[in-house]
Image (spheres, helix red, strand yellow):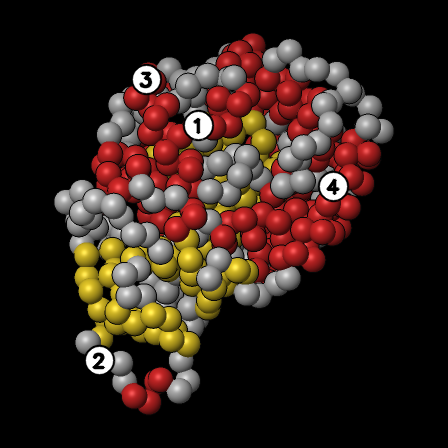
Amino acid sequence: MIILKNATFIDWESLAFTKSNILVPKGVDQAIQFVKEIPKELNAEATLIDCTGKYVTKSFVNGHHHVYSALATGMPAPKKIPGNFYEILKYIWWTLDKSLDLEMIKTSAYVTAIACAKSGVTFAIDHHASPFAVEGSLQTIADAFNEVGVSHLLSYELTDRDGVKIANQGLAETENYLKNNQGLVGLHASFTLTNKTLEKAANLARKYNTGVHVHVAEDLYDQEHCYDIHNKRVIERFNDLGILNLKRSLLVHCLYLTNAERDLIRESGLFVAQNTESNLNNNVGQFNSCAIGNNIMLGTDGMHSDMLRAAKATFYNGQLNDTIDYAEIYHRFRNANRYLKTNNFKGDGENNLVVLDYLPSTYMSESNFLGHFLFGLDTTHVQHVIANGELIVKDRIITKVDESAIKLKAQQISQKLWNKMQTIPL
């Protein structure tokens, strides 16, 4: 049990402010309790955190992440400089994922989970790829996340780009993982997938009552390839294969869509994960929410783990390219929580909280909280993080693993990865 004493609680949905002591039980998806007086019998057993002058609210969710990119920061330039998005994938990210082994994956997962936790993210929805280290990759990620204390919804990125054998290994890895864990069936993008693999993936999702996690029209190339090969657009292709009927599915990016495709997404009720900074970095285009519906959430596409930063970037960019105001950006920021709740995934219950050491220089209340959310709060204010009732960050320090040791090892592993990338043929 954790007791948050003298807290100012901000309800994540209503934004109502409540001053109270909060009892936070340990366990998955447990309810918190507001009490005027702290029971004396709890004082000796519980972890007491004085939250006087602090704000407490529900922790955050990353709606689309890539563990495999965690060791990319500062890596050398690729052997050939890419000239378009397809070449960015081929020369950089497909070279990186082909170089991964299980040790690198484990290290990447530790680094990602630590970054998530320290930025107030207690749940990550990840989309993984390691074509030469498929077997055991998802459990390796899960184990590292569990050790840090961050909940997860994992998937392996199925693709035919590396041949039938590796595609089948991806299907097998996905099924082995789904037998004992909640997760999604990962798909790279339409242009790297045959109908046969897509049908197998959809059947696997139905078998385990889950959905797919798929990149959609991140670049115009995805649509052009789909029309040239299948005489239809990406969302039409997915709809014809029954993928839009898998209600737990998550569609990522969705930049190049016709009005008809937007209608199909809206009518399906599926969630869309927007990744503004990645789209800008890859220069692929701009997201526009027109006619897609209200189920738009935020991800980082592996660039970082900071959802407060992602929200700000999305809001600023949206002033030129989308219809988005204070209420809408907060709605998208919290839609990842709603996605998990709507689809009955575990690990994002009430006892996932962040304590914010935020001393505003102007008045803050329910009526103007969104202004502080956008222009005041950032991850430097994340002091304590509670995941499933456990204190996983205390006074900005990771509690369950040795962050310094992991990062020192990651420095060595990253060099090994970068050297290996130079040996991968283009």
Identity of the residue drawn at 18% across and 42% down: 368
Point out the tag, 3 or 1, that comes first from the N-terminus.
1
Numbered mark located on residue 37 in the image: 2
Image position, residue 81 (x, y; %): 70, 15
Which residue type carries mark 4? Ser
Which marked residue is nearer to the observer: mark 4 or mark 1? Answer: 4
Image position, residue 147 (x, y; %): 59, 63
Q: CA distance from mark 4 to mark 1?
A: 26 Å
Which residue type carries mark 3? Leu
Residue beneath disc 3? 320
In the figure, 212 relative to 120: above or below?
above
Whether label 4 touches label 2, CB < 8 Å: no
Point out the tag, 4 or 3, that comes first from the N-terminus.
3
Instruction: Name the outermost residue toward the left.
Output: 367
Point out the tag, 4 or 2, that comes first from the N-terminus.
2
Image position, residue 76 (x, y; %): 73, 27
Whether label 2 touches label 1, CB < 8 Å: no
Report the quarter where the N terminus lies. Answer: bottom left
- Residue 328 figure quarter: top left
For disc 4, the neighbor class at 10 Å (few under 14, some 14 to 19, many from 20) is: many
Point out the tag, 2 or 3, that comes first from the N-terminus.
2
Q: CA distance from mark 4 to mark 2?
A: 51 Å
Residue beneath disc 1? 276
Q: CA distance from mark 4 to mark 3?
A: 37 Å
Kindly tell me whether residue 133 is visible in this rendering. no
Q: CA distance from mark 2 to mark 3?
A: 50 Å
Report the quarter where the C terminus lies. Answer: top right
Instruction: Name the outermost residue toward the front.
Output: 361
Q: Secondary structure at mark 4?
A: helix
In this rendered view, identify the residue nearer to me: 244 or 150.
150
